[in-house]
């Protein structure tokens, strides 16, 4: 007898107990890094069952949950990811999801925009390091040479960032994203060194967060951008100031005047690997496989 297909599963990655974890439809909580913490049982699904990369969670963070969904969610129409204290700030259910997604390939969190058109390059570099960024880029260009122009454009001429690795899509698109990015993550993992700081060892997780937007850019997906909500006592918002709506409208007007000026007169950047970074990577024993094509 054929099992009825579920409509939506949004995995909620969690690594510790928290009162804000949602484990009811359409959300399905998943304990990440479970293979490394057998003493901990949060009382819901664990990422160390089935085909999994649970032991890689310290480096991959929420990506271990996304991988689990790729390999183990087999009978669902829509799949996605949220975090144990961060969710889409809209109601999503079996009855309205088709209407919400009508005309769109993917739902993501509202983008961040700046005047800095190499924002994705600068952001990933800030989260990691100069050397790490260029290793990430070298791996991308090596593994996905057919998207060379899109990769360069995304990192050099794009001022929009799609944050938090949160998304919802038809399972076919979810799977395609994983097939596009995980071979790149695995290749990068072989190449990057162990860092002395634990935060820097999360390089692949940072890379994953900054490249959800790259996947969207390369595949030319039509995305629906919605607000997100962060839950917890330290996330309380300050009271709304008087005339705040007017102030916001004025700030937006100034922003778009400046943005239009920048857009009209800027020249597109080209990707340039600084000689000192190149020499340093080569001296450290790294063979540049993708950057040599620039």
Image: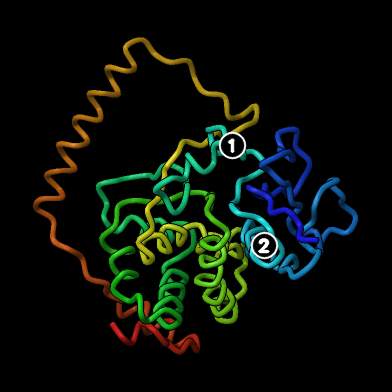
What residue lies at 32% left-to-right and 45% top-to-bottom? 113
Pick the quarter of the image with the N terminus.
bottom right
Q: Residue at x 27, y 17 (%)?
A: 246
Q: Position of residue 265 (x, y in %)?
A: 9, 53
What's the coloring here? rainbow
- Seen as rendered, the residue at the extreme top is 242
The residue to which callout 2 is attached is 64
Q: At numbered mark 2, what does the secondary structure look like: helix, strand or loop?
A: helix
Quadrant the C terminus occupies: bottom left
Q: Of the residues tagged 2 and 1, which is closer to the observer? A: 1
Q: Considering only vertical position in the picture, is 233 above or below 157?
A: above
Q: Is residue 41 left or right of residue 290?
A: right
Disc assigned to residue 95 = 1
Side of 293 where 23 appears, left or right:
right
Which of 289/22 is in front?
22
Q: Is residue 135 above or below residue 219?
A: below
Instruction: Determine the residue located farthest toward the left in the rendered image.
Output: 265
* Residue positioned most to the right: 39
Tell me where residue 236 appears, x and y as whole percent. 57, 24
What percent of the width, then of the height, locates residue 252?
A: 25, 30
Question: Is 50 or 40 nearer to us in this picture?
Answer: 50
Residue 135 placement, left or right of 71: left
Tag on residue 293? Answer: none
Q: Is disc 1 surrounded by few (<14), some (14 to 19) or many (20+) residues within 10 Å?
A: few
């Amino acid at each position: 007898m054929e099992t009825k297909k579920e409509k939506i599963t949004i995995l909620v990655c969690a690594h510790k107990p928290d009162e804000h974890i949602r484990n009811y439809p359409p959300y399905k909580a998943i304990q990440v890094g479970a293979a490394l913490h057998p003493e901990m049982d949060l009382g819901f699904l664990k990422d160390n069952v089935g085909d999994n990369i649970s032991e890689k969670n310290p480096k991959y963070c929420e990506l271990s949950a996304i991988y689990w969904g790729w390999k183990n969610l087999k009978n669902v129409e829509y799949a996605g990811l949220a975090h144990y204290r961060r969710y889409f700030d809209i109601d999503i259910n079996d009855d309205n999801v088709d209407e919400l997604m009508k005309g769109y390939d993917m739902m993501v969190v509202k983008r961040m925009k700046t005047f800095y058109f190499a924002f994705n390059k600068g952001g990933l570099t800030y989260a990691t390091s100069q050397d790490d960024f260029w290793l990430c880029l070298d791996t991308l260009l090596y593994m996905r040479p057919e998207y060379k122009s899109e990769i360069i454009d995304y990192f050099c001429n794009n001022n929009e960032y799609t944050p938090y690795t949160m998304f919802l899509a038809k399972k076919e698109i979810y799977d395609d994203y994983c097939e596009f990015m995980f071979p790149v993550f695995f290749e990068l993992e072989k190449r990057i060194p162990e860092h002395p700081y634990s935060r820097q060892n999360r390089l692949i997780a940072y890379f994953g967060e900054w490249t959800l937007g790259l996947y969207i850019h390369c595949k030319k997906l039509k995305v629906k951008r919605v607000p997100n909500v962060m839950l917890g006592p330290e996330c309380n918002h300050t009271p709304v100031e008087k005339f705040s709506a007017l102030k916001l409208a004025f700030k937006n007007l100034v922003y778009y005047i400046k943005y239009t000026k920048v857009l009209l007169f800027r020249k597109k950047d080209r990707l340039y690997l600084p000689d000192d970074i190149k020499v340093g990577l080569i001296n450290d024993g790294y063979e540049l496989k993708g950057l040599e094509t620039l």
